[in-house]
């Protein structure tokens, strides 16, 4: 009966002309359903892509990136004073794949100080296939707030680490610097890049041999000298007789917190990378060879009355005595003529052998990558050996020079330079390079030089300073320039106290000028010697507490800064 009613109703509807309308409605309903399903599917896919796929993809990329942006351990001086550290910052990045309106984003962000220009922003986010691009690193909090207030989709901040150098340019050439990703560029930062990343997990820091007090004094006095004598630059180092570098300054320097303003010349470390012909300070080596080889004694006499011919050149003295000189007088008055004749006593082969033994023919070893190679003569003949006796023909770094001289004065036992605390060499472990007698005689000669010779302006009352000055013309092209336009490098090297030089100092000025205080002279005795005096006067009270009752005590207990850790 029910079926009959339905069939009857259908026949009635069909008879009434509605069959065609029903068919059309069915088609429209199916079409609308299909379209709705497609649209819903597209919207769902986009939501899943934006909220899940893109988000986690960007997160994965970010995690992969931050593996290389790690916090690094602190660097401190020998007393635990902080020199370099890492601080937490926030860096702004974009996910171009989810940015809705690039033009709007570029317009708004480019107006915020510290963010990239509109052109750079557009270039960074133009590739929609990317999920992660840095926009600005280490953004200050006030800038972060301005960016976040914009509420732009796809613009985020990520935890980051920035390397901070507490004392700006004070330790720039030694500590070095890192790039924006925290990767070491130079100095200790570069050499200990892996260790610094490891130390932070062990709650350790890199302890250096440097002393911030001594570094500040040396930096200030060297800066004053460069300014006073209108030099192109300068360098200075303090080294203990264990090889520890207590201070190292090279000028000009740079601010490692702002590498954008640094030039390559500012980043050049004159102490370890710059080679130069040291001039008369190399006479320390010359007399040490003569005494140690037995070729001469302190009383041996050398005639310095007339200039000495070497080929077509003549060896002359600056304000010479024009008389025969003992070896001691030749050293104290810095006679070039006598130095060349001293070399003739022991000869080329002995000179070369000692230069090798003393470490002047190989580059120095220290824990920073900026190390210069010595420039050794290709032809080492008699004339070369004679000019080398008074400081020409061999170009070495200040680090090589102070290391060799310190070794000679250190009872003749080799020291090895280091910047890492705890690596200092015990005296008994070192290799002997000259005899104790030679070491004692050279110390006596250097003391006489400060008392009566070219180093008188380095003398400090009450302290047995020893030292030697050197003035060398700089090579210009194939020669040393015209007499009226020659450039000089002036150097002082010395230490205290005389019997056991615990601390050694080297100071050099690049092309200093004569001033009214120097009475028209630009030699080492008039510029670097008084600079050394100023450094000694300020550092000795920090370093040395006086002589021991036991004159044979050669320990470092008299130095206040030497501590067992």
Image (cartoon, helix red, strand yellow):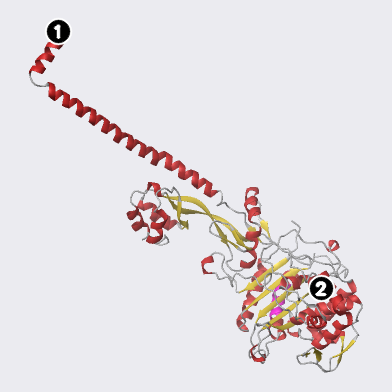
> Quadrant of the rendered structure where residue 541 is?
bottom right
Residue located 39% across and 41% down the image: 50
**Is 203 located above or below residue 84 in the figure?**
above
Q: Quadrant of the N terminus?
A: top left
Residue located 86% across and 74% down the image: 439
Q: Counting other residues with Cα less than 10 Å from the Cα at mark 2, is it few (<14), some (14-19), or many (20 or more)? A: some
Q: Position of residue 122 (x, y in %)?
A: 38, 57
Q: Position of residue 364 (x, y in %)?
A: 74, 67
- Give the prevailing secondary structure in the magenta stretch: helix
Residues 72 and 240: in front is 72
Q: Counting other residues with Cα less than 10 Å from the Cα at mark 1, is it few (<14), some (14-19), or many (20 or more)? A: few
Residue located 77% across and 71% down the image: 361
Asked if residue 341 is among those painted magenta in the image, a careful observer would answer no
Judge left or right: residue 317 versus residue 163: right
**Is 189 located above or below residue 156 in the figure?**
below
User: Which segment is the magenta one?
Assistant: 531-540
In space, the residues marked 1 and 2 are separated at their CA atoms by 125 Å
Residues 163 and 269: in front is 269
Q: Quadrant of the C terminus?
A: bottom right
Q: Position of residue 481 (x, y in %)?
A: 66, 87
Choose the circle earlier in sequence order: 1 or 2: 1
Mark linked to residue 42: none
Judge left or right: residue 8 versus residue 347: left
Q: Position of residue 8 (x, y in %)?
A: 12, 11
> Quadrant of the rendered structure where residue 546 is?
bottom right
Judge left or right: residue 59 versus residue 126: right
**Dot 1: what SS?**
helix
The residue where tag 2 is placed is 355
| Residue 459 visible, this orientation | no
């Amino acid at each position: 009966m029910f079926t009959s009613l339905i069939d009857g109703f259908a026949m009635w509807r069909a008879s009434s002309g509605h069959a065609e309308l029903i068919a059309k409605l069915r088609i429209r309903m199916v079409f609308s359903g299909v379209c709705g399903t497609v649209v819903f599917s597209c919207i769902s896919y986009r939501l899943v892509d934006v909220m899940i796929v893109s988000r986690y993809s960007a997160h994965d990329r970010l995690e992969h990136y931050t593996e290389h942006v790690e916090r690094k351990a602190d660097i401190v001086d020998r007393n635990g004073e902080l020199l370099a550290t890492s601080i937490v910052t926030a860096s702004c990045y974009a996910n171009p794949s989810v940015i809705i309106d690039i033009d709007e984003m570029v317009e708004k962000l480019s107006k915020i100080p510290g963010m990239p220009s509109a052109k750079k922003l557009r270039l960074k986010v133009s590739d929609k296939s990317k999920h992660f691009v840095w926009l600005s690193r280490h953004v200050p909090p006030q800038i972060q707030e301005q960016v976040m207030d914009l509420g732009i989709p796809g613009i985020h901040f990520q935890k980051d680490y920035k390397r901070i150098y507490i004392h700006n340019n004070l330790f720039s050439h030694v500590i070095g610097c890192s790039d924006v990703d925290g990767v070491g560029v130079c100095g200790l930062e570069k050499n200990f890049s892996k260790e610094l990343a490891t130390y932070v997990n062990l709650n350790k820091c890199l302890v250096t041999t440097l002393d911030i007090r001594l570094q500040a004094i040396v930096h200030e006095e060297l800066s004053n000298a460069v300014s006073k004598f209108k030099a192109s630059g300068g360098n200075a180092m303090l080294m203990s007789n264990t090889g520890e570098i207590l201070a190292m300054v090279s000028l000009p320097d740079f601010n490692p917190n702002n590498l954008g303003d640094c030039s390559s010349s500012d980043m050049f470390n004159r102490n370890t990378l710059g080679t130069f012909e040291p001039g008369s300070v190399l006479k320390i080596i010359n007399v040490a060879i003569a005494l140690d080889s037995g070729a001469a004694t302190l009383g041996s006499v050398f005639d310095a009355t007339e200039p000495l011919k070497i080929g077509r050149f003549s060896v002359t003295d600056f304000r010479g005595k024009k008389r025969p000189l003992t070896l001691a007088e030749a050293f104290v008055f810095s006679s070039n003529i006598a130095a060349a004749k001293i070399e003739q006593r022991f000869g080329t082969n002995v000179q070369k052998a000692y230069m090798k033994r003393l470490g002047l023919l190989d580059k120095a070893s220290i824990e920073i990558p900026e190390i210069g190679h010595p420039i050794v003569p290709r032809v080492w003949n008699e004339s070369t050996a004679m000019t080398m006796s008074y400081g020409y023909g061999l170009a070495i770094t200040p680090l090589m020079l102070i290391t060799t001289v310190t070794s000679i004065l250190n009872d003749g036992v080799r020291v090895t330079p280091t910047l890492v605390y705890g690596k200092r060499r015990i005296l008994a472990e070192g290799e002997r390079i000259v005899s104790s007698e030679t070491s004692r005689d050279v110390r006596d000669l250097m003391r006489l030089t400060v008392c009566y010779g070219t180093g008188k302006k380095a003398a400090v009352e009450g302290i047995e300073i020893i030292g030697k000055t050197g003035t060398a013309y700089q090579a210009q092209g194939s020669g040393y320039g015209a007499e009226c336009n020659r450039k000089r490098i002036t150097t002082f090297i010395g230490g205290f106290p005389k019997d056991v030089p615990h601390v050694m100092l080297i100071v050099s000025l690049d092309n200093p000028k004569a001033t009214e205080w120097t009475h028209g002279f630009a030699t080492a005795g008039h510029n670097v010697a008084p600079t050394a005096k100023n450094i000694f006067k300020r550092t000795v009270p920090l370093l040395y507490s006086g002589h021991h009752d036991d004159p044979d005590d050669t320990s470092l207990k008299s130095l206040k800064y030497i501590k067992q850790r």
